[in-house]
Image: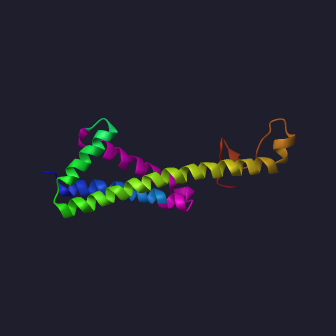
Amino acid sequence: MTNLGQLETLVLQVSQAVKDLRLALESNEIDTLEAILVQTSQALEAINGYGGSLVAKEGVEKLKMDILALPKTDSNRLMSALEQASIDHQVNGELIKLAMQRSAALQSFVAQQSLGATYEIGGGIPGTSGSLLSKKV
């Protein structure tokens, strides 16, 4: 028999991590993003490796089978949380794409405004570090 407490902890951990990431992305909380990404990555790795699986899909499928083996009320509650986490995960992917587009647009804007980008030999763009805008912009 599957331990309800362990399943519940795992599903709620993943659900909360994905939800936290979505909230951070929606509110553009750049300062907290790194820690939340680490938390989300660890939670997703735990769910993908569930039951000792080395293949992500197998871990998720085993988790779902174990959840469905629970009493109906517990099973419905955990499957609902897992489905919401899946939806949030898909939305997070879209929010990340939008953030990347926004960053590229800001870099283009800054480059157009920069005299150094136009008139300097090095073509430096102020406010950038590497390929990302700094937090100062």
Q: Residue drawn 38% across and 56% down?
A: 85
Q: Residue drawn 21% across and 53% down?
A: 68
Decide if residue 76 is on the left or right side of residue 114.
left
Q: Do we see residue 134 in this rendering?
A: no
Q: Residue furthest right?
A: 119
Name which quarter of the figure residue 87 lies in. Answer: bottom left
- Image position, residue 57 (x, y; %): 32, 40
> Which quadrant does the C terminus fall into?
bottom right
Decide if residue 93 is on the left or right side of residue 123.
left
Q: Which residues are magenta?
A: 23-52
Of residue 38 and residue 67, the one placed in the foreground of this image is 67
How many labels, in total?
Answer: 0
Q: Residue drawn 55% across and 59% down?
A: 29
Decide if residue 83 is on the left or right side of residue 112.
left
- Image position, residue 80 (x, y; %): 31, 60
Of residue 83 and residue 18, the one placed in the foreground of this image is 83
- Image position, residue 97 (x, y; %): 56, 49
The stretch drawn in magenta includes residue 46: yes
- Image position, residue 130 (x, y; %): 66, 41
Q: Main secondary structure of the magenta part?
A: helix
Q: Do we see residue 109 in this rendering?
A: yes
Q: Residue drawn 25% across and 58% down?
A: 8
Above or below for 115 versus 74: above
